[in-house]
Image: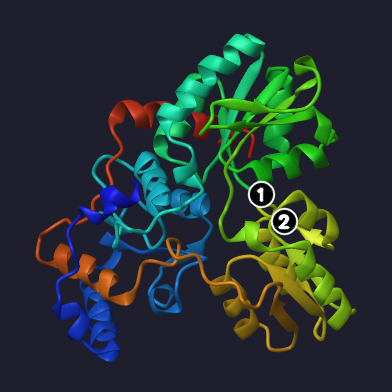
Amino acid sequence: MNILEAAQTAALPARYQEMTTAEMEARVREIKESFGKTLFIPGHHYQKDEVMQFSDAAGDSLQLAQVAAGNKDAKYIVFCGVHFMAETADILTSDEQVVVLPDMRAGCSMADMADIAQTERAWTKLQELFGDTILPLTYVNSTAAIKAFCGRNGGATVTSSNAKPMVAWAFTQKERILFLPDQHLGRNTAYDLGVPLEQMAVWDPHTDTLQHEGPLEDIRVILWKGHCSVHENFTVKNIEYVRKTHPEMNILVHPECSREVVAASDYAGSTKYIIDRIEQAPSGSQWAIGTEMNLVKRMIAGHPDKHIISLNPYMCPCLTMNRIDLPHLLWALESLEQGQEVNVIRVPQDVAAEAMLALERMLARA
């Protein structure tokens, strides 16, 4: 869902802005207790503490969708995350289960950087250039329509945790890959698998052009020109500053950061990798972390025995990933209590079926 579509959805009733935090928290607890097992609230790692305190499971997007799908008792899944995560949950859960997104403005700018019209147009042109030699892969941070595109063209989804084995698998299927929508994860993953940078090209969906210097036949990886607006803002200068001011500090970043930042860091890995690395780190160790600010703050609070900072202390939380707040969560829950289903996420059956193919190809190799 784009910003215009989100703006046309139902607005939060004014009375929720007039309630105190204590009143809202008490009501959420009351409703959770009354619904019991028929209500499940997954919370993504990037969410605010004010909603995470009520989550029944915390995790990354695919992990939460899988947990929701495995929860057969839950009639209502109120997803504290963003639109593409709720879509994946709807795809994986049964038709009888209802997935609700408390605030329809909660989205992902990266996912919005690849729409299906752009992708179909790019695919036609790339087929003309390279023939039937390309397998599409999409990061799970993408719309259901893009997942469906990959499904019907023999491709699969990937996560930041399993991107390497999935890219390796893709090269057993076709000579080349098209990686959507995050160029940085695609570039970092392919590079780690031994693909030289000169064998990678970038597809610009705004100009419908392939950006590459050298012979076309040398291209093995076609990267969609998309990025995470948060992770792209970590820079080599940030790293240089930390190296100068905190020479003992380990630098740990997410692979959605640029190739230059990942290369200059000590460690790079998925959100789960980052969390596990900090949990397993010895007391007294020092860490500068390049990922979303809410998660970094939560790790700082959860590990007082370690010196943890953000790699970029001036970084703001992701405005769309960070959208869901306590008033919207309570509104969604009270609406369900009153028999009204607001902000329901339903993926059309034909799209869901093809997207499931892409997800299943990944899950079969998990």
Which amino acid does the dot numbered 1 rest on? Ser
Rendered view: 336 above or below 172:
below
Regarding mark 2 in the picture, which secondary structure is present there?
loop
Image quarter of residue 101: bottom left
Quarter-wise, where is residue 73 in the image?
A: bottom left
Vertical placement of residue 314 versus 156, above or below: below
Residue at 70 percent across and 52 percent down: it is 255
The residue most toward the front is 207
User: SS at mark 1?
Assistant: loop
List x then y, in percent, for residue 124: 51, 15
* Residue, disc 1: 161
Q: Residue 206 versus residue 305: which sits nearer the camera?
A: 206
What is the quadrant of the C terminus in the image? top right
251 over 193 or under it: above or below: below
> Mark 1 vs mark 2: which is more N-terminal?
1
Q: Residues within 10 Å of mark 1 (few under 14, many from 20)?
A: some
**Closest to the observer, 274 or 240:** 240
Q: Would residue 3 be seen by someone viewing this image from the given angle?
A: yes
Looking at the picture, which amino acid does disc 2 mark? Answer: Gly
Q: Residue at x 78, y 67 (%)?
A: 237
Give how far across and how far down residue 274 sits, in percent. Answer: 69, 64
Question: Which of these two is toward me, 312 or 330?
Answer: 312
In the image, taking residue 202 as reference, residue 226 lies left or right, namely left
Q: Evaluate if marks 1 and 2 touch, with contact meaning CB atoms under 8 Å apart.
A: yes
Which residue is drawn at the image coordinates 84% and 59% (left, top)? 264
Q: Which mark is residue 269?
A: 2
Q: How many numbered marks appear?
A: 2
Query: Measured from the top left, where is residue 340 in percent x and y?
Result: 11, 59
Mark 2 neighbour class, 10 Å CA radius: few under 14, some 14 to 19, many 20 or more: some
